[in-house]
Amino acid sequence: MRVPRCLAALGGPTHLPAVLAVGGALLIGCDATPTESVQTPTAPTFNFVNGPSELPNVVRFSTDAGGFFIPDENSGLIVVEGLPDNPQTLYLCEGGTNPASTLDWQTVGWLRGVVHALQTGEDVNIHVYRLSDVDFSFPGDPFLHLWCAGTPLAAGAGRAKYVDNDFFAVGGKNNAVTVQIHGTVTDLQTEEVLRVRALLHVVQNLAGYPDVPPTTKQFKTQVQLDPIGAHGP
């Protein structure tokens, strides 16, 4: 079972793997095209989008086509990055017109054919849902159905990061994928301010892929939702 890469934006994957039943990530931007170069600022910065959008070995672009989500069975929570302020207005929902949060991509390694991907989002929307609210009997995509029809537990903003050391799964070796979502959210019932930390980490052996199904060597999901100050800065 291969961890998915290019999935329907904040909805269901093109081939829903069982891994999503116990914890997974959703990402978008795989069909995006590189943007024009961002003008170099006068002061130095460490944001990779300030570089050229295309070099022989590097491609950079931004997209608002979607984002990530991380469900976690232990906490019973799902953390979603990228939905609009009102998730039910997402462009994939019936009558919705709003895009997802903008994420910046950098892909490196085109000359060697094994592409490393980095995707980041700053000050992006974060919503927290209960995993028990997912209707897995829904005939379409149960996660998109939750975004479009459900009620989040909490909402706020923060940052997201996605790292993949073999984006197209062509290296034939171990491939590690890590997704992190960190931020501050407000409980929509109690108005308590909470800190959210969500992590997905998967390591798979791709020897023989796609003829041989990959072997999962490590799989970890973790979602923490704590009062501000409960666990340090």
Image (cartoon, rainbow, N blue to C red):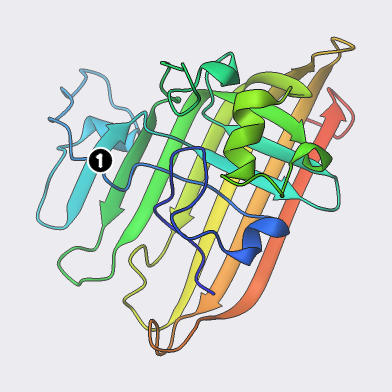
221 is higher (above) or lower (below) than 17: above
Question: In this view of the protein, which residue sits in the foreground, 159 or 4?
Answer: 4
Corner quadrant of residue 153: top right
**Quarter assignment of residue 185:** top right
Which residue is situated farthest in the front direction here? 139
- Name the one closer to the observer, 129 or 162: 129
Find disc 1 in the rendering and name its residue. 32
Q: Position of residue 180 (x, y in %)?
A: 60, 45
Give the quadrant of residue 35: top left
Residue at the spot 32% in from the left edge and 28% down from the top edge? 45
Place of residue 226 in the rendered image (x, y in percent of width and height, measured from the top left): 85, 31
Question: From the viewer's perspective, is residue 155 above or below residue 200?
Answer: above
Q: Is residue 182 among the parts visible in the rendering?
A: no
* Neighbourhood count class around disc 1 (C-alpha, 10 Å): few under 14, some 14–19, many 20 upward: few
Quadrant of the image for the N terminus?
bottom right
* View extreme (top): residue: 191
Point out residue 206 in the picture as x, y percentages from the top left corner. Answer: 45, 81
The x, y position of residue 219, in whole percent, is 67, 67
Amino acid type at circle 1 is Ala
Q: Quadrant of the C terminus?
A: top right
